[in-house]
Image (cartoon, grey):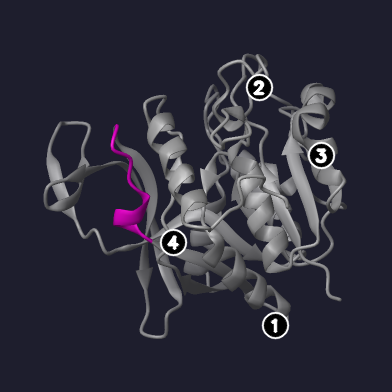
Amino acid sequence: MKKTTLVIMAAGIGSRFGKGIKQLEPVGPKGEIMMDYSIHDALEAGFNKVVFIIRRDLEKDFREIIGNRISALTEVEYAFQELDALPEGYTKPEGRTKPWGTGQAVLSCKGIVKEPFVVINADDYYGKDPFVKLHEYLMEEHPVGDVMPIGMAGFILKNTLSDNGGVTRGICILDGKGSLAGVNETKNIIKTDEGAAVVTEEGTVMPVDPASNVSMNMWGLQPEFIDLLESGFVEFLSNQKEGDLKGEYLLPVYINELLKQGKAQVQVLPTTAEWFGVTYQEDKSSVVQAFKRLIATGVYSEKLYD
C-alpha cells in the first residue's frame, strides 16, 4: 500500500508546555486536544504515518503528552524546527527569538518525509472531508517535473471565521479549471452581519465575499517539494534586511511565488467542512461545544480511537 504521511506543525508550542498553550488545550470529553481529531481523521482517510514538527527541547514532554499514544496507532517520527537550523553560510541574527515560519518548519522534514504528505497546523480542526479528498489526491500519480504538483484544501471563508476577533486567511484566486492562480494573504478578517470584512490598520472596514475560497495551510505535497523549500529558504535569507528579527518564511507565500514563476500547479479541492480553532482564549468554549455536537450526532465516538 502506498505510504502517505500527515505532517503536523507543532513547533510553535511555548516553553510552558501544557500550561495555557493553545495547541494542548483540551477540547474533547476525555481531554482530547485538537491534534487528536486531526490524526483520527487522517488515519481514517488512509494516511499511515504521522510526523510531528516540534522544538527539540520539548521532545520528552511532547512524547509523553501525545506522541507515545499515537505511536501505538501508527508510525510516528519527529522533525525539529530550530532557530539555528540554517543553510551553510548563514547564522541566526543576534536577538532573533521568533521562529522562521511554516516554510522552514516543513523544510525540517528533509530526510524524514520521503512520501506524499499533507501538512496541517497543530491548533486547527479541519473536518473529515478535506483529509479524504487530499488523501485521494496523493494516491493519484502526479509526476514531478519543472512544474511542482500541489493539492490544497479550499475552505469557504465564512466557515473559517472566529466569533471573537479577526483572523488571517489566504484568500484564493482560481482560474476557470479549479486551479489556484494566486493567494492573497489577508489579515484581520472579521464576521459581519453581511458576512465578512477586512479591518485595515487605519480602521477602514472593507467587505469581502464570504463565499471566497481560502487556504487554511492544508496542503497536499510531494516529497520533492522539500528540496524546493530548501532553495527557497536560501533566497529568503539572502533578501532579509539587516536587523530584521521577525521576517518569516511562510508556506503560502512561497507557494504563491512558485505560481507566479510558473513552477507550480495547485489543484484546489473544495470542501464545505467547517473549521474550528482556538485563535482566541474565548474561542475555547465554542470549540468544546462544537465537539460535543459532533459526538452527539455520531461523527465521533466519545472514546475517540475506538
Q: Amino acid at mark 4?
A: Ala
Q: Could you say which disc has been placed on residue 69 in the image?
A: 3
Above or below residue 261? Residue 306 is: above
Q: CA distance from mark 4 to mark 3?
A: 27 Å
The residue to which callout 4 is attached is 273
- Disc 4 or 3, which lies upstream in sequence? 3
Q: Is residue 39 left or right of residue 50?
A: left
Badge 2: few (under 14), some or many (20 or more) residues near its Cα, within 10 Å?
few
Q: Measured from the top left, where is residue 177 in percent x and y?
A: 41, 85
Q: Measured from the top left, where is residue 284 in percent x and y?
A: 43, 30
Quadrant location of the N terminus?
A: bottom right
The residue to which callout 2 is attached is 93
Along the line of sight, the residue nearer the viewer: 224 or 136: 136
Residue sitting at x 43%, y 48%: 293
- Disc 4 or 2, which lies upstream in sequence? 2
The residue to which callout 1 is attached is 140
Per the rendered image, the range of residues in magenta is 156-164
